[in-house]
Amino acid sequence: MDIDDLDPRVPKKTLKNLEPMAVAELEEYIAALKAEIARVEAQIQAKRSQQKGAASLFKF
């Protein structure tokens, strides 16, 4: 038994086929991706704030 056999198998995500999409659809797709990036960045900022708060609480 190999150690890699114990890891859960996560299927690789395939990239979206952009070829059949029109320019307007591509622009909408970009807007959706930018909105998702903003959501993720906000979550990162919130977690960093929590981490800083916890770190300051436990400093001696």
Image (cartoon, rainbow, N blue to C red):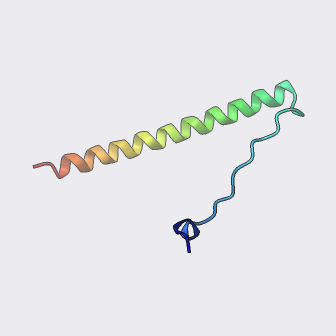
In percent of width and height, residue 22 lies at: 87, 28
Whether 47 is drawn above or below 19: the answer is: below
Q: Residue furthest right?
A: 20
45 sits left or right of 8 in the view: left
Name the side, left or right, on which 14 lies relative to 57. right
Residue nearest the observer in this picture, 24 or 4: 4
Residue 55 rendering spot, x and y as whole percentages: 23, 48
Residue 18, quarter of picture = top right
- Quadrant (top left/top right/bottom left/bottom right) for the N terminus: bottom right
Q: Quadrant of residue 20?
A: top right
Q: So how many labels did they put on this image?
A: 0
**Left or right of residue 38: residue 54:** left
Q: Position of residue 43 (x, y in %)?
A: 47, 44
**For residue 22, above or below residue 54:** above
Residue at 78 percent across and 41 percent down: it is 16
Determine the residue located farthest toward the front in the rendered image. Answer: 1
Measuring 86% from the left and 32% from the top, which residue is drawn there? 19
Q: Name the residue nearer the viewer: 17 or 35.
A: 17
Single out the residue that lies furthest toward the left. Answer: 60
Image spot of residue 54 (x, y percent): 25, 50
Q: Residue furthest top?
A: 23
